[in-house]
Image (cartoon, rainbow, N blue to C red):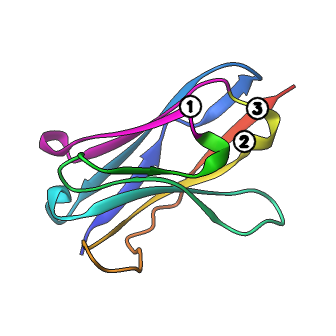
Amino acid sequence: QVQLVESGGGLVQAGGSLRLSCVASGRTLGDYVVGWFRQAPEKERERLADVDSSATTTYYEDSVVGRFTISRDNAKSTVYLQMNSLKPEDTAVYYCAVRRPFYRDYNGWGKGTLVTVSS
């Protein structure tokens, strides 16, 4: 089973940028689709972006299109989320998770990394 650790969160002013990292261990990351999610206080977890195993296909949730970019480096077992033009409403705990191609359910959830955007 793959284990994931997120990092790169922090406090940033509105309009600023952060790059989150998701490092995998235990299994070959290249076998999985990787997704980034977030959960704000008192809100449900939402899927923001995902990338297929070869990085040829990506998905973005509407609210992050044009601001967030997902990428992966399978040699480093790492997936990144570059976040630009951050807004206060982006404040949340950010998580990564994996799923097998053609499967729906994600697993391997890490503990998350907190992103706080001040106005």
Magenta segment includes 45: no
Which residue is rendered at x = 67% and y = 45% of the image? 63
CA gap, disc 2 and disc 1: 14 Å
Q: Which mark is residue 90?
A: 2
How many circles with numbers are drawn on the protein?
3
Q: Which residue is mark 1?
A: 66
User: Residue 97 is drawn in which quadrant?
Assistant: bottom left
In the figure, is residue 100 to the left or right of 83? left
Look at 58% across and 37% down and name the residue there: 9
Kindly identify the amino acid type of the residue bearing the numbered disc 2.
Asp
Q: Is residue 76 magenta?
A: yes
Label 2 neighbour load within 10 Å: few <14, some 14-19, many 20+ = many
Q: Which residue is mark 3?
A: 87
x and y percent of residue 19 in the render?
48, 30
Q: Secondary structure at mark 3?
A: loop
Residue stretch in magenta: 65-85
